[in-house]
Amino acid sequence: MIIVAPSLLSADHGHLAREIESLEAAGADWLHIDVIDGHFAPNLTFGPWIVEMARKLTRLPIDAHLMVTDPLTYGPTFARAGADYVSIHVEATVHLHRALAAIRLAGAKPGVALNPLTPLCYLEECLEYVDLVVVMGVNPGFSGQTFVPNAIRRVETAASLIANRPNANSNVPAPLIEVDGGVSESVAPFLIQAGATVLVSGAYLFRSPDYKEALARLRR
Ligand code: DX5
Ligand code: ZN
């Protein structure tokens, strides 16, 4: 089953509550919340109160994507605010294990995100500690950017690393593979074939007049 996670960054910020209700009614699977601090990536977006607000409004799993230089502090903050998944960037901290453990301890499922040219070998060390791998399809910062095509090959490599992960024979579920940035109906089939299970959608979905139809086109 393909999970589609609309990114609130592209929503109408004057009517966030209404947008969240429409997305849930249209059949969105998760809600993706992009947290950008103006240092790790060039933009300023949401604080933890947006997650608290969304948590009260919807039952959809909340997928917080932290593009911040201090994931050790803010990972647990967003977990406590009510996010189900909290993903942090491998490029952001030298204390990745500590930050992932802190997110789990604070009650969320940790995820690890990698920018378009960050070596995937980082994953070999992380896979036992995460529930989600986020393969970036754009450089973090903004919605509506052009998809970097190497993400398709990177999803394939991530899938094979996951299949061969150290705890592959245990009962621990395999991490999901999410693609974030530049996803549209034209690249979605290639990403799904490569092994992606979660597709984030910003500009493509929110530019569509009919969310339900756009969600269906992405899953096809
Ligand atoms: C980029 C964000 C993405 C972005 C997705 O920094 O992490 O989640 O909002 O938007 P689109 O689908 O428009 O690239
Ligand atoms: Zn994101």
Image (cartoon, rainbow, N blue to C red):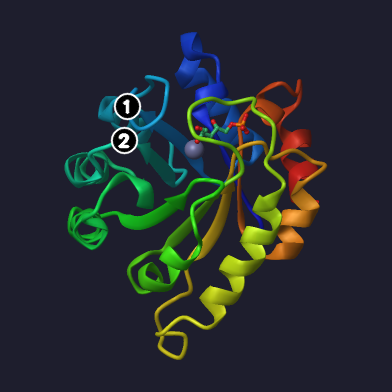
| Percent of width and height locating residue 180 | 57, 43
Which numbered tag is attached to residue 136?
none
Residue 17 point in image, percent of width and height: 45, 20
Considering every residue shown, the one lying at the far top of the view is 14
Q: Residue furthest bottom?
A: 169
Which residue appears at 49% of the width and 34% of the height? 140
Describe the element under mark 2 as helix, strand or loop.
loop
Read off the residue under disc 2: 68
Task: Tell me: 73 left or right of 87.
Answer: left
- CB of mark 2 within 8 Å of CB of mark 1? yes
The kind of residue on which mark 2 rests is Val
Q: Secondary structure at mark 1?
A: loop
The amino acid type, in three-letter code, at marker 1 is His
Q: Is residue 210 above or below residue 84?
A: above
Classify residue 102 by image quadrant: bottom left
Q: With 98 as the anchor, is 160 left or right in this view?
A: right
Q: Nearer the viewer, residue 122 or 192?
A: 122
Quadrant location of residue 156?
A: bottom right
Which residue in the protein does label 1 denote? 39
